[in-house]
Amino acid sequence: MIKARKMTPSSPEPTPRPEAIDWAMVERDLDARGCAVLTQLLSPDDCRALAALYPDDSRFRSRVVMARHGFGRGEYKYFSYPLPEPIARLRPLLYAHLVAVANRWNATMGIDVRYPGDHDDFLARCHRAGQTRPTPLLLQYVEGDYNCLHQDLYGEHVFPLQVAILLSEPGRDFEGGEFVLTEQRPRMQSRAEVVPLRQGDAVVFAVYNRPVQGTRGSYRVNMRHGVSRLRSGRRHTLGVIFHDAK
């Protein structure tokens, strides 16, 4: 098991609060729309402490400038192992609540892959396949930045759900920068959904495919996500991806 890294004394330790969430409603929303909002998963103090880690390069394994790769504008950094304690606790807690949905979706779509109930066991599967690099990331946007529609896959072993937590407050810290999902159904035009979030809210969403029930049974739809253009200010987001990368 990979140990967590403690926060610095000047940064209060965020306390994940998934136990306060109505997970039955989350499951219904995921089935209906491919996403669900987890309200106030982190407190404002928690959010500020995590956002304040961004300048500390010792916490991260790499930095990506989106414009260099055609990903959009803005930048993000992947955390290194060991993860800061709040992220190290939050990742397996959320996974434990989402793994049943992931397994049910795969069964519905005729995908043979099943995920173990314990996140450490799933990470061990990733690591055996050479996917050993941590994927939780901290994103930073300033005025004019945006994130193109994309999917976070990283290797053969992919957990089909992920979580993004907004660490900044809309209307105070920034304007614009809405979280956007698109859904491509077979032989239909793409459907877009803008997910409104406040500071500390999280959105859990499908990474790439999800099942939809039609009149003739279920079928797969293709999902992508991104962030619209930031009109002003600065926006930080924590991305929690459950599989590791090659």
Image (spheres, rainbow, N blue to C red):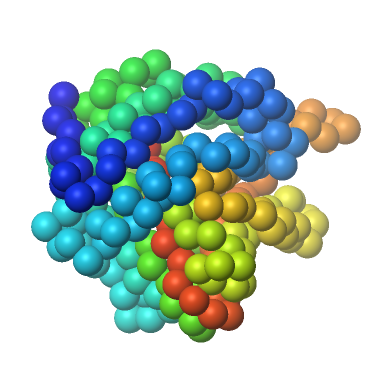
Q: Residue furthest left?
A: 58
- Could you say where residue 11 lies in the image, as x and y percent from the top left? 24, 48
Q: Residue at x 58, y 80 (%)?
A: 231
Image-based side of 63 in relation to 98, left or right: left
The image shows residue 223, relative to residue 170, as above or below, that is above
**Which image quadrant for residue 209?**
top right
Q: Is residue 216 toward the left or the right of residue 94 in the image?
A: right
Residue 190 visible in the displayed image: yes
Residue lying farthest top? 117
Q: Residue at x 53, y 60 (%)?
A: 169
In the rendered image, residue 74, in percent from the top left (x then y), is placed at: 40, 75
Residue 151 seen: no
Q: How many marks?
A: 0
Residue at the extreme right of the image, as rendered: 215
Q: State the image coordinates of residue 38 (x, y, percent, origin top left).
A: 58, 37
Residue at image location 33% in from the left, 81% down from the top: 68
Quadrant housing residue 115 = top left
Q: Nearer the viewer, residue 7 or 161?
A: 7
Residue placed most toward the observer, 58 or 1: 58
Decide if residue 92 is on the left or right side of residue 34: left
* Figure quadrant of the N terminus: top left
The answer to which of 224 and 2 lies nearer the viewer is 2
Residue at image coords 38%, 45%: 46
- Horizontal side of residue 210 vs 142, given as left or right: right
Residue 212 point in image, percent of width and height: 73, 36
Vertical placement of residue 135 versus 4, above or below: below
